[in-house]
Amino acid sequence: MVTADEIAQLCYERFNELPRRGKPEPGREWTPLAAVVKITRCAKSGRVEKEVVSLGSGTKCIGQTAMSPKGDVLNDSHAEVIARRGCIRCSHVSDLPAGFSVSAPIFLQSKLEFPFSQAQTELQHKAGQGCITPCGAAVSWCKVPDQPLDVTASGIKQGVTKKALGTAKSRSALCKLELFHSFLSVVSSTDASVLPDSLRRTDLHTYLDYKEASEAYQQAWQLLRNQAFPLWPRSNRDLLLFK
């Protein structure tokens, strides 16, 4: 049996192990934290292994007018979105299972509070630190061999110079364009005989084409949306037509 406190503690420890860059200033800035944890149960021994595979923090969305139709800007940097996209990065370099096993989510409440939550930040705040504000950066970590840490601000990599704006150097590894290119690389390197029928079609060109063609993904996401995320915003379809 895995408890909510065990999962929370594991996630907090992983966040604490990350470099300082992009994290909130203690006592002045707060941020939520979201993560994806892989749980493996050994049938023979009954042993349970827990591993954080994706983690994200962030509170910002760049706004409708700043969103890019090229998919090269991270439009939404809320923690839940960051963690979900980090999990997608992991799936691109793992075993890529053939299908989904969908089940109803179970909600558990941990007694352990995130040290950088708004409530904890207010408790730690000291005179002279200025106003308490949400952290302006988003931090992503996922279990991939290449560039596991990704820190962004205003939808692009934190610290990017003006000269590099609009180039590949400014793109977050979690933006739709980067994830799409990674996906296409996996598809092109996979023998056509083992690809699902939906990926053998010749009329797939844009990010939206491939996303809508994945029936298993659409079914799983719709179920999760209905059960757990009814208010999750739907992207403007015109922002998904890039190649």
Image (cartoon, helix red, strand yellow):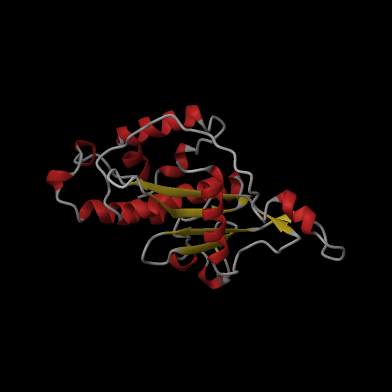
- Residue 1 at what x, y percent from top left? 45, 41
Outermost residue on the right side: it is 127
Outermost residue on the left side: it is 193
Q: Can the viewer see residue 57 in this picture?
A: yes
Position of residue 231 relative to residue 11, above or below, is: above
- Residue 203 at what x, y percent from top left? 24, 39
Image-quadrant location for residue 199: top left
Depth order, front residue of 44/51: 44
- Residue 127 at what x, y percent from top left? 87, 63
Q: Residue at x 51, y 35 (%)?
A: 234
Q: Is residue 118 left or right of residue 182?
A: right
Q: Is residue 20 left or right of residue 70?
A: right
- Residue 113 at what x, y percent from top left? 65, 49
Position of residue 223 relative to residue 46, above or below, is: above
Q: Can the viewer see residue 68 in this picture?
A: no
Question: Looking at the image, how many numbered discs can be counted on the residues?
Answer: 0
Q: Is residue 41 left or right of residue 68?
A: left
Q: Residue at x 51, y 58 (%)?
A: 140
Outermost residue on the front side: it is 45
